[in-house]
């Protein structure tokens, strides 16, 4: 694996761990796709830093479990704002 990919994977993982960030937040921060973030943080990181990969995996698992709640809250906020504008 190329060195810059390893460095990026570690940087992405550190960002996720420090900020308890989602894949989407990390992708936006580093200017890469969500797929790349996911692959860096799970598959690539596992090869050379399994401890860090385990930490990231636990954060991503929690985020996945909470995803439907965040989506529902965003939808609720959207419709509340729509009704506010109608008044």
Image (cartoon, helix red, strand yellow):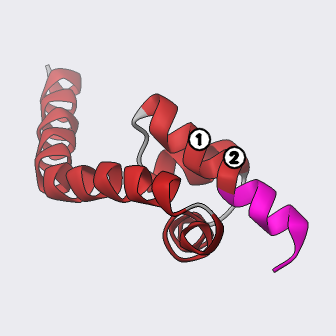
The residue at 62%/66% (across/down) is 33
Towards the viewer: 23 or 75 = 23
Q: Is residue 79 left or right of residue 63?
A: left
Question: Furthest residue to the right?
Answer: 3
* Residue 47, horizontal then vertical, whole percent: 61, 75
Towards the viewer: 46 or 19 = 46
The segment highlighted magenta reads: 1-9
Q: Is residue 82 left or right of residue 48?
A: left
CA gap, disc 2 and disc 1: 5 Å
The residue at 59%/66% (across/down) is 45
Check residue 11 in the rendering and tell me which mark sits there, or answer none. Answer: 2
The crowd level at tag 2 (other Cα within 10 Å; few <14, some 14-19, many 20+) is some
> Which residue is disc 1 drawn over?
14
Q: Are marks 2 and 1 in contact (CB under 8 Å)?
A: yes
Q: Which corner quadrant of the image does residue 80 belong to? A: top left
Q: How many marks?
A: 2
- Is 76 situated above or below 22? above
Name the quarter where the N terminus is drawn.
bottom right
* Residue 6, horizontal then vertical, whole percent: 76, 64
Q: Which corner quadrant of the image does residue 48 belong to? A: bottom right
* Residue 14, horizontal then vertical, whole percent: 59, 41
- Label 1: state its secondary structure: helix
Q: Is residue 54 left or right of residue 29?
A: left
- Is 53 situated above or below 81? below
């Amino acid at each position: 694996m190329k060195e810059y990919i390893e460095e990026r994977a570690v940087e992405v993982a550190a960002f996720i761990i420090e900020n308890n960030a989602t894949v989407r937040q990390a992708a936006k921060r580093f200017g890469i796709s969500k797929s790349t973030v996911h692959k860096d943080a799970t598959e690539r990181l596992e090869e050379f830093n399994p401890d860090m990969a385990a930490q990231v995996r636990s954060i991503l698992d929690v985020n996945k479990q909470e995803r439907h709640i965040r989506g529902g809250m965003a939808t609720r906020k959207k419709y509340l704002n729509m009704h506010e504008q109608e008044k």
